[in-house]
Image (tube, grey):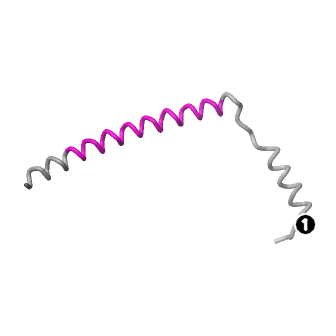
Amino acid sequence: MAKTTPIDFIRQVRAETAKVVWPTRRETWMTGVMVVIMTTMLGTFFFAIDSVFDAAVALLLSLAK
């Protein structure tokens, strides 16, 4: 494997970085909004499931007394 000098490495990094397609401001904003919406939905879902299991365990423990 050929060794590269630090200067060649930096040139290669700059060349690869120039090939990157960066998202637009709108794409970034829409992705952020979708993340917030999905996180809220998942949080609500898990809260509801946890509440159901909590009620079920409380009921089972009350029957054991």
Left or right: residue 59 compared with residue 19: left
Left or right: residue 44 compared with residue 62: right
Q: What stretch of residues is rendered in magenta? A: 27-55
The image shows residue 25 at horizontal and vertical percentages of 70, 30
Q: Quadrant of residue 5?
A: bottom right
Q: In this view, does 14 lie above or below 48?
A: below
The image shows residue 49 at horizontal and vertical percentages of 30, 42
Q: Which residue is drawn at 80% across and 47% down?
A: 17
Element under disc 1? loop
Q: Quadrant of residue 32?
A: top right
Q: Which residue is drawn at 65% across and 34% down?
A: 28
Asked if the stretch drawn in magenta spans residue 29, the answer is: yes
Q: Residue at x 85, y 49 (%)?
A: 15
The N terminus, quarter of image: bottom right
Q: In this view, does 55 lie above or below 64?
A: above
Q: How crowded is mark 1: few (under 14 residues within 10 Å), some or many (20 or more)?
A: few
Q: Is the magenta stretch mostly helix, strand or loop?
A: helix
Nearer to us in this view, 15 or 47: 47
The residue sitting at the front extreme is: 65
Asked if the stretch drawn in magenta spans residue 53, the answer is: yes
Report which residue position mark 1 lands on: 5
The C terminus, quarter of image: bottom left
Say what amino acid the circle numbered 1 marks: Thr
The image shows residue 48 at horizontal and vertical percentages of 31, 39
Q: Which residue is drawn at 34% across and 41% down?
A: 47
